Image (cartoon, rainbow, N blue to C red):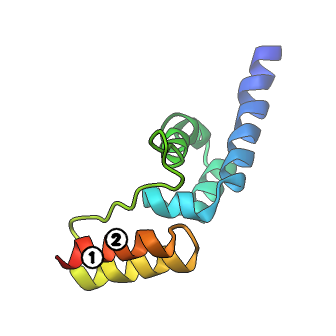
Amino acid sequence: MVVLVVVLVALPLVALISALLQPASSWDDIGKNKTLWVILVLFGPFLWIVYLSVVRPELRRSHVRPVGATRPLVEMPQNQTVPEQLLRLEALLERETISDEEFAKAKKNLLS
């Protein structure tokens, strides 16, 4: 009985709280919609399992930084045009996800 309560009540609640506490920038980094996933976890039967087993690990990996790095590396999707990539870089700079120096380096690499 206790196991059933944990599986049907506690784990969905953990998934919901986890989804709500993730910063918007992490959701942007993995290309998923936070609001949609919160609704799916809340109302979708057993979709919290998908969140906990697939989406949450992706969100956690988006926080992993190489040893010695103070900020995440800027990786631009290759399927975007140069202007789209520049707009994404500017958005990252505005959200203070990257520093001015990182922006300048990424822009230089993009335009070279």
Mark 2 — residue? 105
* Image coordinates for residue 3, horizontal then vertical, percent: 76, 16
Circle 2 residues within 10 Å: few <14, some 14–19, many ≥20: few
Can residue 45 be seen by looking at this rendering? yes
Image quarter of the C terminus? bottom left
- How far apart are the alpha carbons under marks 1 and 2? 5 Å
Circle 1 residues within 10 Å: few <14, some 14–19, many ≥20: few
The quarter holding residue 6 reads top right
Q: What residue type is labelled 2?
A: Lys
* Image coordinates for residue 86, horizontal then vertical, percent: 33, 81
* Image coordinates for residue 71, horizontal then vertical, percent: 52, 56
Residue at left 71%, top 25%? 7
Q: Are marks 1 and 2 in contact (CB under 8 Å)?
A: yes
* Image coordinates for residue 104, horizontal then vertical, percent: 37, 76
Viewer-side residue, 60 vs 11: 60
SS at badge 1: helix
Q: Is residue 102 above or below residue 56?
A: below
Mark 1 — residue? 108
Can residue 81 be seen by looking at this rendering? no
Residue at left 71%, top 32%? 11
Residue at left 48%, top 76%? 100
Q: Which amino acid does label 1 sit on?
A: Lys
Image quarter of the N terminus? top right
Extreme residue toward the left, this view: 112
Viewer-side residue, 19 vs 70: 70
SS at badge 2: helix
Count the marks: 2
Viewer-side residue, 41 vs 65: 65
Q: In this view, does 100 lie above or below 19?
A: below
